Image: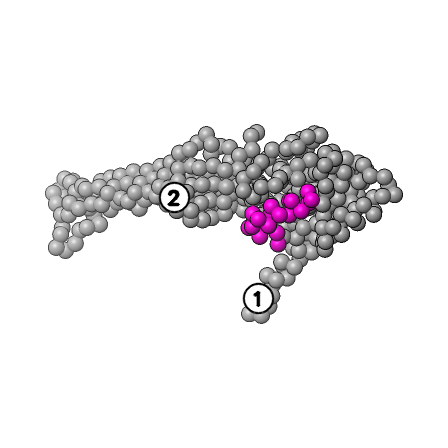
């Protein structure tokens, strides 16, 4: 399935049904009074989160989403049928904007979560509603209000615990294949990864996390170069970033330190809090170095980068050092979740 992470769609809620004008006419009751019923409410449009979906491609082929109109009222005080609400499934991580005003409408982040994006029209009133002691035979009614209409801009930000960061061909996809169930494309040329993919990593039988393989970032990506900033936003969802650096690039004129600094520069330029996110350095392809030079060469890269965070030396293709990385990530995620739970309990304890 083609990966689509942006879409524009028009949504139209149903109009409210108009009220009815009628009078009760039965044998022996010539002046029974008004009995026109109200119309039905128009249907609303909701977006609903679905874990099974991972793309907005359906929105590319269905540009108009319209809910049912409410039916008009009937005689004998019968209310018209309300229009059915329309529930549109979207992948988790979908951010919804009003395309005309750039207003953030909401963010769908959990299974079954519903986000109202267009409210149905209110029903019209029948003439029964207008009778009074001074107006015993009203002929007034209201037509019902129009349903809300707007053009939505949908942006998908991949939901994952961990995201990969680095230049093309740094070995990000190989790392994902080595530690997770995902099978992203791997080849000996840049830009083999053209869209984000998710993989589940199992530290053991009952402990797991989700990792996202993000396409490589090149110089100028924050300004739209290469695959551009279309995929930088996916990193905003990740709690931890793995900065993957190729210690032995296949291009002899590529310096690992400059490559790492280039990726760091782009996320700082893009903003969105990416530069402040926890980031670990993963020095990949150590199998290409002489064994006696691995530690000294990796330390040289760390020193030149002035790296202060955790550092891991791995060979994704040979799964060397990947188990230690997986368990370190799992421990970190569990620690962060424990801290979040303790922070949530503090206000309750003080109340």
Checking the image for residue 347, the label placed there is 1
Whether residue 222 appears in magenta in the rendering, the answer is no
**Magenta stretch, main secondary structure class:** helix
Could you tell me residue 49's position as x and y percent? Answer: 52, 42
Can I make out residue 181 in this image? no
N-terminal of the pair, mark 1 or mark 2, is: 2
Q: Left of 272 or right of it: where is 323?
A: right
Residue holding disc 2? 100
Residue closest to the far front:
253
Q: Which numbered disc, 1 or 2, marks the residue closer to the eye? A: 2
Instruction: State the SS at label 1.
Output: helix
Q: Residue at x 68, y 30 (%)?
A: 189
Frontmost residue, 267 versus 240? 267
Question: The N terminus lies in which quarter of the figure?
Answer: top right
Question: The C terminus lies in which quarter of the figure?
Answer: bottom right
Q: Residue at x 45, y 41 (%)?
A: 153
| Residue 342 higher or lower than 138, as above or below | below
Residue closest to the far right:
292
Gap between marks 1 and 2, in whole Å?
A: 39 Å
**CB within 8 Å, label 1 to label 2:** no
Whether residue 273 appears in magenta in the rendering, the answer is yes
Q: Residue at x 80, y 40 (%)?
A: 286
Can I make out residue 154 in this image? yes
Checking the image for residue 36, the label placed there is none
Report the magenta residues as a range.
258-276
Could you tell me residue 129's position as x and y percent? Answer: 22, 50
């Amino acid at each position: 399935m083609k990966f689509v992470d942006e879409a524009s769609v028009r949504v139209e809620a149903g109009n409210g049904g108009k009220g009815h004008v009628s009078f009760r006419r039965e044998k022996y009751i010539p002046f029974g009074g008004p009995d026109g019923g109200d119309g039905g409410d128009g249907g609303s449009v909701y977006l609903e989160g679905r874990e099974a979906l991972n793309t907005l491609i359906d929105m590319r082929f269905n540009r108009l989403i319209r809910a049912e109109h409410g039916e008009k009222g009937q005689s004998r005080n019968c209310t018209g049928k309300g229009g059915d609400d329309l529930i549109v499934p979207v992948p988790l991580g979908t951010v919804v904007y009003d395309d005309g005003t750039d207003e953030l409408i909401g963010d769908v982040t959990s299974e079954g979560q519903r986000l109202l994006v267009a409210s149905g029209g209110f029903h019209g009133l029948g003439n029964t509603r207008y009778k009074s002691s001074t107006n015993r035979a009203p002929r007034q009614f209201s037509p019902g209000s129009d349903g809300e209409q707007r053009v939505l801009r949908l942006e998908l930000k991949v939901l994952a615990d961990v995201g990969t960061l680095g230049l093309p061909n740094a070995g990000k996809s190989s790392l994902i294949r080595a530690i997770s169930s995902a099978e992203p494309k791997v080849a000996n040329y840049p830009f083999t990864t053209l869209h984000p993919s998710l993989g589940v990593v199992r530290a053991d039988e009952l402990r797991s996390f989700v990792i996202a393989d993000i396409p490589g970032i090149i110089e100028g990506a924050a300004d739209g170069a290469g695959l551009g900033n279309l995929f930088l936003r996916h990193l905003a969802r990740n709690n931890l970033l793995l900065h993957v650096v190729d210690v032995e690039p296949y291009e002899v004129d590529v310096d690992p330190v400059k490559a790492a600094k280039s990726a760091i520069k782009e996320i700082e330029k893009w903003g969105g809090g990416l530069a402040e996110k926890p980031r670990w350095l993963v020095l990949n392809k150590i199998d290409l170095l002489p064994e006696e030079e691995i530690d000294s060469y990796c330390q040289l890269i760390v020193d030149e980068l002035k790296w202060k965070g955790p550092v891991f030396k791995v060979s994704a293709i040979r799964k060397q050092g990947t188990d230690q990385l997986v368990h370190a990530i799992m421990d970190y995620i569990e620690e962060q979740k424990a801290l979040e739970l303790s922070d949530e309990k503090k206000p309750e304890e003080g109340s």
